[in-house]
Image (cartoon, rainbow, N blue to C red):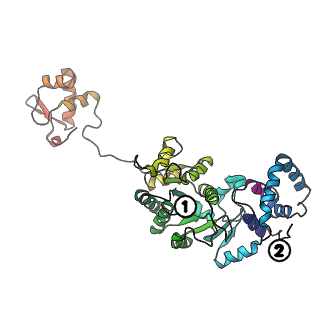
Amino acid sequence: MTAAVFDVDDPRLATAAWSRIAEPGDEMAGALVQTWGASGALRWLLGAALPGSSAESEYRSLAALSRGRLEAARTRWQPRLTTLDPRRELRVLATLGGSLLLPDDRGWPAGLDQLGVQRPHCLWVRGSADLSGLMTRSIALVGARAASSYGEYVASEMAGGLADRRFVVLSGGAYGIDAAAHRGALAADGATVVILAGGVDRAYPAGNASLIERAIDAGAVVSEVPPGSVPSRSRFLTRNRLIAAASRATVVVEAAHRSGALNTANHASGLFRPLGAVPGPVTSVSSAGCHRLIRDGAAVCVTNAAEAAELAGALGSDLAPEIHLPDRPEDGLSGAERLAFDALPLRRPASIEALARSAGLGEVELLSALGTLELRELAQNRSGQWIKATRLSGHKG
């Protein structure tokens, strides 16, 4: 076994090392680190003495339950030990003006702790290191890379509206919906957080490099893998759990049946986080995934920033405003009054007998209803015959 060239008992170095050794979401690595701490787990992996008698007992229990998985994990981790030196990656981070966040640090976003053994070992951050503060009022807007103009418009407008409401917008920095969400927040002078699948030293995709740089100034760019790490398909998928866990709620703006955004939605549902989906044209395959989420009851229908804010906001203070429709003249009428109102002609007055036949009411009941309509200035009595009031002559019912 290659000996470490750094102090494995330094918790920051050991934690940074684990972010290189194990792939994101590796449950065995998470279990070992949470059991022994990053330094203890690393010493075990390097073949050093176990960190105490209690740890040996814990190891025997763990090995008895899952020896095959433990040995398989050791095998897959060992190839990365030969070049392991987290000091090098921390120097790169320092030249970028970044910082390393550990779970016990003040700026650590508490929502990530719900991931259990899939919690990231640490976060490599450029921009604000107070991710805890940024996530206090946060919402993830996600969707397809191959977005339609409709989807990008909705994402941008929704992000801008959320920024106006002092929400931080999270997304993954990709083309399409992600980029539109980041741009919308920035255009409204709001904060946005980009969670990358690769290292924070390389903007991906390269076409969004300037956007990602702007996000550093207005919020943060974050990764769970160290500088130099290359994004891959599996890392994109495991990255999605961070977007769902770090934010207060997730809204899928546009997604086809097989969109990666649905993976983020599944993580949000698994964490019992509020989940919304934006409907699109029923003929659009780009919105088919959103429609499925709504139809299956997994997500609520979200059509604007106010409704998105209601998902993620504080109870009682971020409610979407009620829709107030204009009053119609006949609102509040009883059944008989409505029948009488509908029977009234617009141009030529009608007799009581004609109105009774048309309305299907007895004359006594009809006269009572007409009296109420007259008081409400909805009907006029013209020499014993009745007509809708003059001010309603253009009303179509």
Residue 267 on image: x %, y %:
61, 51
- The residue positioned farthest toward the left in the image shown: 383
Q: Is residue 28 magenta?
A: yes
- Which residue is drawn at the image coordinates 26% and 27% (left, top)? 336
Which residue is under mark 1? Answer: 171
Amino acid at circle 1: Ser
Q: Which mark is residue 100?
A: none
Q: Which mark is residue 5?
A: 2
Q: Is residue 318 magenta?
A: no
Which image quadrant is residue 244 in? bottom right
Give the mark nearest the N terminus, 2 or 1. 2
Q: Which one is nearer the viewer's eye here, 153 or 138?
A: 153
Looking at the rendered image, the quarter that the C terminus falls into is: top left
Q: Is residue 211 above or below residue 367?
A: below
SS type, badge 2: loop
Residue 103 on image: x %, y %:
71, 62
| Badge 2: residue crowd in 10 Å (few <14, some 14–19, many ≥20) | few
SS type, badge 1: strand
Magenta stretch, overall SS: helix
Q: Which one is nearer the viewer's eye here, 210 or 322?
A: 210
Q: Which residues are magenta?
A: 26-35
Which label sits in the foreground, 2 or 1? 2
Amino acid at circle 2: Val
